[in-house]
Amino acid sequence: MKRHEFELDDLIKRIKENDNRLVALQVPEGLKMQALEMMDAIEEDTSARIILAADPCYGACDLVHDKMQRMGVELVAHMGHSQMNIDSGMPTEFINVTYDGDPAIDPVLPILAMHREIAERRLSEASSKGEISEEEAQERFMDAVGRVSPLKGAKLGLVGSIQHLHLIFDYKERLESAGFEVEVPVGGARLSFPGQVLGCNYSGDRDDIGHYLFLGSGDFHPIGLVLHTGKPLAMLDPYTGGAEEMSFERIEGILRQRFGLILSCDEAKTFGILIGEKPGQMRRNLALRMKKKLEKHGRKGYLMALEHVGPELIDFYPVDAFVNTACPRIAIDDSVRYAKPLLTPFELEVVLGEKKWETGYKFDEIP
Ligand code: SF4
């Protein structure tokens, strides 16, 4: 943790220029232990008073909004995430947090070589599509999430979590020197930097990328990336230097669990439809569409808005199941914590017979 760098200079300059008196500091969970240190640093250098926004914070989707305005807060300092395509209604300064861990690529090279072979095989099968029946094609081109692989290339996609992105082009060069054709994908408006991925957005993916390397720690982003793309993925951890792959068995296990939940909703008549109140998670129109679909199929949907989603806040409602339109990862990563099935919108459409499981899993992305 000691080697994380915080860039407070721009924030301090902005506070001084605007003569801000009350500033909210929002810090992601992994850095909260250092929050008091940051508050001291800002208060020592400015005449502002700092209020720590101490609620859980997992992303820039979760910006401090109007409730702090009512407290008199003039500026929000949001740390460790990048700006999204949302407006929280509060002036917000995003503070970069970087980590200079610089692991060698050697341990990950054998995994990447193996994944490149998988990508090249899928690519060559895809290009011979015209010569075999559609049934055979379905058999042969399945990617990790059960889709017909739409590959047009077998490049290595290089992505990372935000605190390591300053190293991404350096790693691109190292991987190219090791013989890989590397692409740093650029995503849509929810992402700010080349190579960036979020747990809910992998919009930089392209048909000429055949496999991925993720620079970062933990399996949160890798699981989402494989569920979204179906492509093999290796991980290089800047904190430990360790290399591993996201195994297809792990992804299969998640898909089996999702399919089990879908089956368990076959007879469900009533659903709670969750709407996230956080600025970057609020998908009201999607929730309304889900309600309409349920009604069309003779089932009932109740719209429920929450700032935080948790089992203790919803389990007791007398409904058969829930569909979640807030953070997509709540259903995927946390569903075992809930007493009733918690589905994504795509999964509800499968329950209702509007989408087919057999044509491949569709990850719930927020664009
Ligand atoms: S994955 Fe969830 S918490 Fe993370 S940015 Fe997306 S909506 Fe927010």
Image (spheres, grey):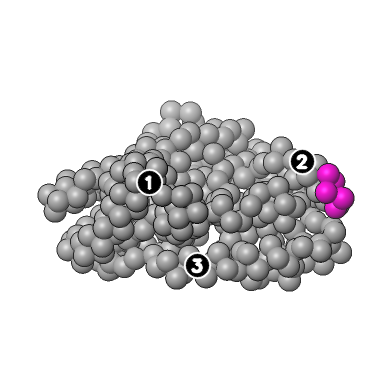
Tag in front: 1 or 2: 1
Q: Is residue 133 left or right of residue 91?
A: left
- Give the Cα distance between marks 3 and 2: 31 Å
> Residue 6, how many percent across, how many down?
35, 49
Which secondary structure lies at badge 2?
helix
Mark in front: 3 vs 2: 3
Amino acid type, mark 2 = Leu
Q: Quadrant of residue 54?
A: bottom right
Label 1 sits on what residue type?
Glu
Separation of residues labelled 3 and 1 (CA atoms): 29 Å
Residue appearing at x 85%, y 46% in the figure: 295
199 to the left or right of 308: left
Residue 27, position in %: x, y? Answer: 49, 53
Q: Write down the residue under mark 3.
A: 252
Observer able to see residue 47:
no
Crowdedness near tag 3: few (<14), some (14–19) or many (≥20) residues, C-alpha within 10 Å: some
Looking at the rendered structure, the secondary structure element under dot 3 is: helix
Q: Nearer the viewer, residue 212 or 101?
A: 212
Name the magenta segment's main secondary structure. Answer: loop
- Please identify the quarter of the rendering in which residue 278 is found: top right
- Region rendered in magenta: 295-299
Marked residue nearer the N-terminal end (3 or 2): 3
- Residue 288's tag is 2
Query: According to the image, label 1 marks what residue?
Result: 131
Name the residue located 50 percent from the left edge and 57 percent from the top edge: 146
- Label 1's element? helix
